[in-house]
Image: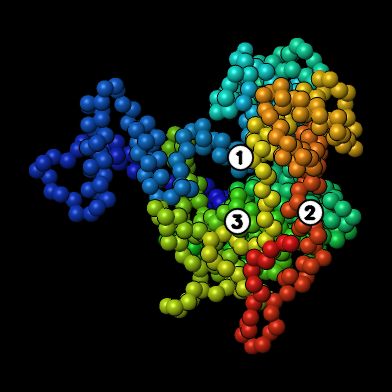
């Protein structure tokens, strides 16, 4: 989770190291008493030896910033990091919800790059690229023999410069060339929002950026929020982002003035973040879906809604990142992301998980006072017990179904999207009501055979429904775009299906124990879906 305030950070460390490197201490000088100065002198001596004796000329800036500073931060925790000029510029663009590129969302598999969606108004959209188009070459470099890492590296490098793309359209046998110039493209953070069933809305949020609260408001208006009967807010896989954005999203669901989190740090004054006035307030029964990749600002939202008994948290335990990163500009357009504080939920708990071997090996448990023999105890507004053992523990556990190894291999190898691309070479366009038939399954089996992939009988028969679902999603995504493909995926997701079935029970699940003086008991956490 990154602080929204970009604060000035002195580059005295770098300047000081360069100065010391030029004029190291002499043997007759007095030995400094403080450890920081002694360490700096040792470091300066190493830099001097590199400059004088290394086999090739050494750039001190590169050695210090790209090497020493990165290594120093890596020794502390996995979140603090140094950004060179290009990386820092990209970080600032992402915070604003914009990125430099061509506006295409791609499916990247070894040897195959497919367009899933193009953002309206982007260079790709203006060129006429759309779902199902296959990029076969970039600046004349054929992609069919590149592995996944090489493909990703090539595509990342290409998005910051004008490129010539060779594109094979579905049904065509010869690629067309397109010359594209990169531009600032705004990619949405609310990537899926639709009416799941009568009165039930579904929203998937990919990250928290400055524009996210307004995107949420727009999604609610499309869903006709005043007439909703329930909502599924999907934060699975959401890595977090801007703290203030998370607070504003909470303002859509909580009362004005409710505590969202408290931030504390050694050099940071304690600050309490509260909800403010919002363009609308959504009061319908709410379930928040989370998993092990729900992190940082997404955990802030989940924990605040849980502590205030506003939402049932369902799914699996979250990642467990309860620290705040402050983004600090350095000289020459570079920057630093540094852990400066920990945050605590409205009930006072920390959700930071222990990270052995780092500065976070023993994170603060929370703001509550604990006895010598007992761990701190935390409660929601209505008295439900909540834990502080790393991450947000769901109120209702919905495990992820584990596919068998064969089906997982087909998915990871991109066989469904590859088949979909080939399917439209021999078939006409499909409708949104398309359902794979037995003939479609047999075509897929023959496709796998042509790729020298076996279809073991024990898996082929058992996985019929999953195969049809995956084929339907792949084909509809290429035919109608990623947004519709995401909706189809959500409608076949067993975790979402169980969450929707859970909505009528939300008021009962959020009810605390009988009030008999101080909290007499608390409902057990982590109940599992049956």
Question: SS for tag 1?
Answer: helix
Which is closer to the viewer, label 3 or label 2?
A: 2
Label 3 Cα crowd, 10 Å radius (few <14 / some 14-19 / many 20+): many
Closer-to-camera residue (351/323)? 351
The mark nearer the N terminus, 1 or 3, is: 1
The mark nearer the N terminus, 2 or 1, is: 1
Is 198 on the left-hand or right-hand side of 241? right
The mark nearer the N terminus, 3 or 2, is: 3
Closer-to-camera residue (58/524)? 524
Find residue 425 and report its image quarter: top right
Q: Residue at x 23, y 32 (%)?
A: 48
Q: Name the residue under label 1.
A: 94
Q: Mark 3 points at which residue?
A: 318
- Regarding residue 123, the answer to whether it shows in the image is no
Label 1 and label 3: CA atoms lie apart by 23 Å
Q: Mark 2 points at which residue?
A: 497
Q: Which residue is drawn at 40% across and 40% down?
A: 70
Find residue 500 and report its image quarter: bottom right
Label 3 and label 2: CA atoms lie apart by 20 Å
Q: Which of the numbered marks, if any, corresponds to residue 292?
A: none
Disc 1 to disc 3: CB gap under 8 Å: no
């Amino acid at each position: 989770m990154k602080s929204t305030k970009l604060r000035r950070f002195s580059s005295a460390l770098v300047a000081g190291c360069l100065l010391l490197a030029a004029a190291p201490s002499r043997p007759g000088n007095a030995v400094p008493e403080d450890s920081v100065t002694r360490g700096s002198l040792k470091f300066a001596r190493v830099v001097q030896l590199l400059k004088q004796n290394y086999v090739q000329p050494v750039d001190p800036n590169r050695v210090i910033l790209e090497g020493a500073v990165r290594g120093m931060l890596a020794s502390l925790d996995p979140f603090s990091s140094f950004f060179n000029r290009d990386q820092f510029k990209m970080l600032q663009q992402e915070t604003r919800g914009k990125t430099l590129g061509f506006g295409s969302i791609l499916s990247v598999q070894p040897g195959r790059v497919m367009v899933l969606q193009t953002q309206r108004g982007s260079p790709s959209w203006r060129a006429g690229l759309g779902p199902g188009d296959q990029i076969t070459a970039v600046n004349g470099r054929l992609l069919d023999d590149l592995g996944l890492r090489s493909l990703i590296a090539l595509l990342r490098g290409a998005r910051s410069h004008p490129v010539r793309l060779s594109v094979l359209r579905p049904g065509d046998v010869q690629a067309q060339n397109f010359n594209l110039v990169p531009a600032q493209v705004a990619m949405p953070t609310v990537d899926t929002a639709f009416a799941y069933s009568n009165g039930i809305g579904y929203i998937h949020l990919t990250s928290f950026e400055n524009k996210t609260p307004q995107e949420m408001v727009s999604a609610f208006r499309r869903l006709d929020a005043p007439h909703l009967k329930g909502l599924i807010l999907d934060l699975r896989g959401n890595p977090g982002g801007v703290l203030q954005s998370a607070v504003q999203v909470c303002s859509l669901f909580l009362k004005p003035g409710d505590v969202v989190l408290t931030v504390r740090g050694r050099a940071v004054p304690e600050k309490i973040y509260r909800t403010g006035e919002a363009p609308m307030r959504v009061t319908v029964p709410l379930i928040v879906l989370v998993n092990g990749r729900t992190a940082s600002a997404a955990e802030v939202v989940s924990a605040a809604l849980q502590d205030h008994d506003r939402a049932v948290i369902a799914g699996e335990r979250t990642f467990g990142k309860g620290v705040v990163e402050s983004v600090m500009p350095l000289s020459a357009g570079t920057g630093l992301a540094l852990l400066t504080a920990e945050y605590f939920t409205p009930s006072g708990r920390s959700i930071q998980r222990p990270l052995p071997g780092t500065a976070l090996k023993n994170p603060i448990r929370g703001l509550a006072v604990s006895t010598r023999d007992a761990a701190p105890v935390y409660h929601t507004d209505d008295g439900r017990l909540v834990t502080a053992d790393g991450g947000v523990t769901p109120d209702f556990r919905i495990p992820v179904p584990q596919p068998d190894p064969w089906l997982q291999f087909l998915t990871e190898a991109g066989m469904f999207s590859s088949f979909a691309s080939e399917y439209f070479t021999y078939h006409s366009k499909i409708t949104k009501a398309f359902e794979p038939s037995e003939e479609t399954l047999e075509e897929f089996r023959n496709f796998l055979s042509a790729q020298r992939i076996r279809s073991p009988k024990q898996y082929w028969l058992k996985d019929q429904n999953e195969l049809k679902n995956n084929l339907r999603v792949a084909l509809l995504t290429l035919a109608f775009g990623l947004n519709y493909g995401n909706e189809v995926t959500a409608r076949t997701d067993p975790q979402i299906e169980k969450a929707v079935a859970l909505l009528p029970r939300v008021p009962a699940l959020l009810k605390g124990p009988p009030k008999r003086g101080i909290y007499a008991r608390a409902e057990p956490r982590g109940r599992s879906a049956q």
